Image (cartoon, grey):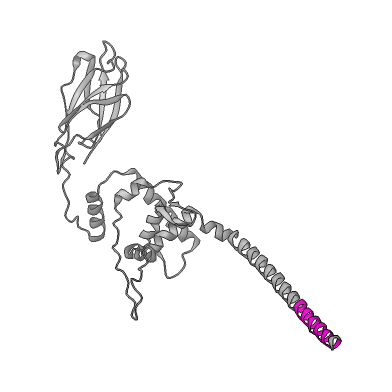
Amino acid sequence: METKTSAAMWGILTAAVASWDSYDKDTQRRLRNLRDDAAGALDQIRDYTTRGEQVRLRLPSVMDALLGIALANPTQTTPEILPSSTKLTRPVIDEGSASDLSWPVKTGSYDGKGRVSELGELSRTFLALTFQEVRAFLEGLAQEKSPTQAGLLQINRAAKQLVYVLSTLSLDNDSYRHIWTNLFSGSPGTVVADPHLGTPTITNIQPGNNISSITFSPGSTKNDREMRIRITAGGGGPIPALADLCTVAFASAWSNTNGPLVPAVVCGYPLYASQANSQAFVIQLSASINAGETRDIPILVGGR
């Protein structure tokens, strides 16, 4: 009886061992497959994250551009059957924004998870590209048919010289509005008169400093904003440096909405403004002018 029982138990044990062995082999096989799959997945993730386009997407300048476009995206407020969106307030991009443009561009600040703490220059630029008038203008540049190579060259030249000419001017908004109105409508429209286009006056010339004459240079522009003066030293000796030469009185006193304004006076070498107020400025030399010598020196004045 014991022999039969032992044999039966050994049979059960043998079958169990065989079953456990098969189960263990299957488990090990599954683990090996999982390890291979995980290693393959990690290799694919590594290959994906190191691809060129993925690396470029993580550059701050590219992230700035994408962020600028993303800022124009309306966001859903709450999940509803009929989705609703938040009404965005359109930011104001004025001429002050152009004053801080630089190259290379100033990029934004991002942490390790790509979260932004400071916007870069390109964010503002690409946000502006989403505005209706900017898109309308850009789409208006597109022609129904592709221009010829000669036509493309003309477009390039016109754009390049337009920017060159504009970069040499110092006009205000009212002046540009007048120019555009006159160009497209044939009439000047409403023009705000510039009070500083009158001719200033040269007074209080100091002949004791060997000055023969101080006048406006013949044929030059002469108004409160820009002028060119001619200084001639006498034959008895040089005009010394740091001595008062004369006073230039503005045709109209400088002011803004807050009252009298002292403008900035920028002079060509060796002239400089030693004193200035809303009505006039006094000029001196930083280096002497030799006896009998004549100098034509530009002066620019500005202020708001």
Q: Is residue 177 left or right of residue 84?
A: left
Q: Residue at x 24, y 50 (%)?
A: 173
Q: Residue at x 31, y 55 (%)?
A: 93
Q: Residue at x 67, y 65 (%)?
A: 39
Q: Identify which residue, 60 or 117, lies in the foreground.
A: 117
Q: Residue at x 26, y 51 (%)?
A: 176
* Residue 205 is at least partly visible in this image: yes
Residue 14: where, in percent of width, then height?
81, 81
> In the picture, residue 44 is in which quadrant?
bottom right
In the image, residue 265 sits, relative to residue 293, either above or below, namely below
Q: Is residue 76 left or right of residue 47?
A: left
* Residue 154 is at least partly visible in this image: no
Q: Main secondary structure of the magenta part?
A: helix
In the image, residue 252 sits, relative to residue 187, either above or below, namely above
Q: Identify which residue, 153 or 67, lies in the foreground.
A: 67
Q: Is residue 258 left or right of residue 30?
A: left
